[in-house]
Amino acid sequence: MGCVCAKPVPIEDSRESPKARQVAPSVAPAQGIAPAKISASAAVSSSRREELTAVRLTSASIAERKQGSRPVSLNNRDAEMRTERQVHPNHQQLRLVGSIAKAGEGEQVAAGWPAWLVAVAGEAIRGWIPRRADSFEKLDKIGQGTYSSVYRARDLGNGKIVALKKVRFDSLEPESVRFMAREIHILRRLDHPNIIKLEGLVTSRMSCSLYLVFEYMEHDLAGLASYPGIKFTEPQVKCYMHQLLCGLDHCHTHGVLHRDIKGSNLLIDNNGILKIADFGLASFFDPEQQQPLTSRVVTLWYRPPELLLGATTYDVAVDLWSTGCILAELYAGKPIMPGRTEVEQLHKIFKLCGSPSDDYWKKSKLPHATIFKPQQPYKRRVAETYEDFPAPALALMEVLLSIDPADRGTAASALKSEFFTTKPLLCDPSTLPKYPPSKELDAKIRDEEARRQGAVGGKLQRSDLERGGLRESRAVPAPDANAELSVSVKKWKNQGNSISRSEKFNPHQEEVASGFPIEPPRPTRNLEATELSHGHYSQKSSHSGPLVNRGQWATARKNDDAALKLSSAANLSSLSGLVAARRNAFLDVSERNSSQLENTGASGRLSESGNERLERRYDQLFHGVSQRKEDESDSYMNQSLHPGFGPKGNKIHYSGPLPRPSGNVDQMLKDHDRQIQEVVRRARIDRSKARKNQGEGNLAGPSIKPYNLGVIPVYPSSRSSVMVFTSSRGSIQQ
Ligand SMILES: Nc1ncnc2c1ncn2[C@@H]1O[C@H](COP(=O)(O)OP(=O)(O)OP(=O)(O)O)[C@@H](O)[C@H]1O
């Protein structure tokens, strides 16, 4: 390992337990990476050089002061220094450590790391040297996450195929860099066959982007599970579950909570080995000394009730809940609780697992308890819902899906459960069938292609998709999952300049800066994927075109992804996610042409001018169109938890805790329906007016055409759905 001491930068969540940091084993050296050639002696001698420079500077400043308006005598200065020595007897050592840290930073920069990374995340890269972008050949895009794009690439040094994860962050924002560096730091701490191995980092001194180099994995569990025709056997399910729990046990015993266990983060190679990936939301924790953490983590479908209820002190049980969801999903063949909103998610949980006991409500003191506690308790129905499941699987599910986190046990106890000791036993990974590469992204592309064809050929019903072996394979990442980041994201949004986020994250610029050649679109891959891979936000987005083309749609979807992180004024109605997404995209696009978002303090409302007008315009046009009442089974949630509309149907922006329901919900829903009809009618009129204007050659109409609903493919409630609840409710912890 290289340098003696990097600057002690807090790279983890500031709420992380300091003890967890202390007990952390030292960062494991990476395989295949030459350690930085930064020797202790080099660091010390360079620190001495620095000390000498510092002495020279001190003398210079004293001389300067002597000449200045407030003369300081040498004697005074000496006295100051003497006092300093008395107050800090070990100040010499402190100065030495500080100097060494600085020297360490200097060495890291000299080793090729960019200064912005060294300045805030020296610890995460300690002992490593960066790989050069031109030492890899990018082959194709294999994954698209909320905060990253993942590519298959060839390491030109040894011919090995690797996965390059390009993480999205703002190198000018220390917070954003720190957040990204936490993933690296955590990955380096873990070393287990069932945890993805970080093999290196690609960046350069001049670059403002960063690629994480991972071993390449052919599949992810979400992609495999949704592949038409693939049905897992019971030994196979046990084999995957066993590996998942082994990996999780390693995380937990090393003080790491994953906080985003889901199918697309469980990678599987051609030898059947499962590895837990995506530590972007992971955090250090210390069971002995719990520190508050954000509750806005874990992808909605896999999020435990305590987080939905706002818990900020939690532990390994959050990952065990997600594991329970995965286990049930593998048997059921589809996600068991695909909620579209946090409220709906909680309702689905209560309906299946029962509502918490009175004791639990009392002891847990969860922030949202008063709002979400149902008047009548819900009965647990896991066993009757899944009566066809094998008994040992059901028994393990019952434990993992316990409402009270204390009842979920540990990964180690799950590994000892009957599930793994009763026949049929788990199979050896090497005996598992070989599959064609299947990733969540492939599943998404397949689904979207089918949907597009359906939309072209006529109305595509949800049932058609399911009959064709298609289903929603992607759970939407935690709304505002990156809660720690959202603060800095908001800052970017509020920056009073005209550069949009799109310009900041223009992949083309970044590709060039990072040294990767820009590839032409690959004809072998679906255009949609190419657009996702290479498209960038149009800097002069045209709003005057009459139809949405695929590029615009892809752009809007990219904006949706950005909006997922940025949504600061999401409403609490039951808008379909797609509409919420389009709304955010609409505002995002419009923002570039008009006003900046202004957060007016506690209310969280947008400024009266500019965006509020845009919002209102959007809502007038689209709000009603896709809005639908919750289905019958969700009526409780409508009543208790959906007070998003005032008595006159006006949308209310909540930023504080939800008010208690008014009680007159029926009337509210009726008013709401009436309002929808009115808005649809007005939207029709507006559209026909706009068409007429176009016919007359007047293209200066409202900039809404890219979202013309008539030409957007019909998507069933899908991945963007949970965006609705990326709300700015103050009651949700950041
Ligand atoms: N090492 C790898 N080998 C092959 N594919 C990978 C690898 N790492 C990631 N992927 C693919 O890329 C996708 C996105 O990666 P990852 O989950 O790490 O990104 P993310 O931005 O954190 O995603 P999310 O939005 O789901 O949290 C994965 O679902 C997977 O399909």
Image (spheres, grey):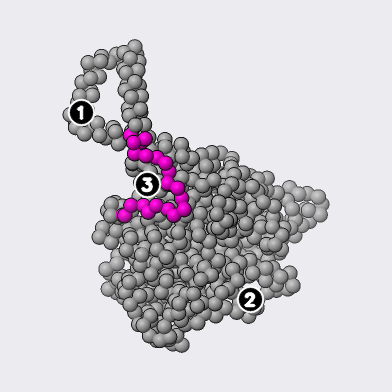
Specify the farthest residue to the front.
Answer: 158
Report the front residue among 554 and 367. Answer: 554
Q: Position of residue 333 (x, y in %)?
A: 52, 79
Q: Which residue is located at x 28 percent, y 55 percent?
A: 23
Q: Earlier in the sequence, mark 1 or mark 2?
A: 1
Report the front residue among 661 and 262. Answer: 262
Report the front residue among 390 and 564. Answer: 390
Q: Position of residue 701 (x, y in %)?
A: 72, 50
| 688 in relation to 344, above or below | above
Check contact, mark 3 vs mark 2: CB within 8 A: no
Q: Position of residue 296 (x, y in %)?
A: 42, 59
Q: Which mark is residue 465?
A: 2
Which residue in the structure is indicated by mark 3?
1
Q: Secondary structure at mark 3?
A: loop
Q: Position of residue 339 (x, y in %)?
A: 49, 70
Label 1 to label 2, Cα distance in Å? 75 Å
Residue 419 in sight: yes
Which residue in the structure is indicated by mark 1?
85
Q: Which residue is located at x 63 percent, y 76 percent?
A: 465
The quadrant in which the C terminus is found is bottom left
Label 2 amino acid? Answer: Leu
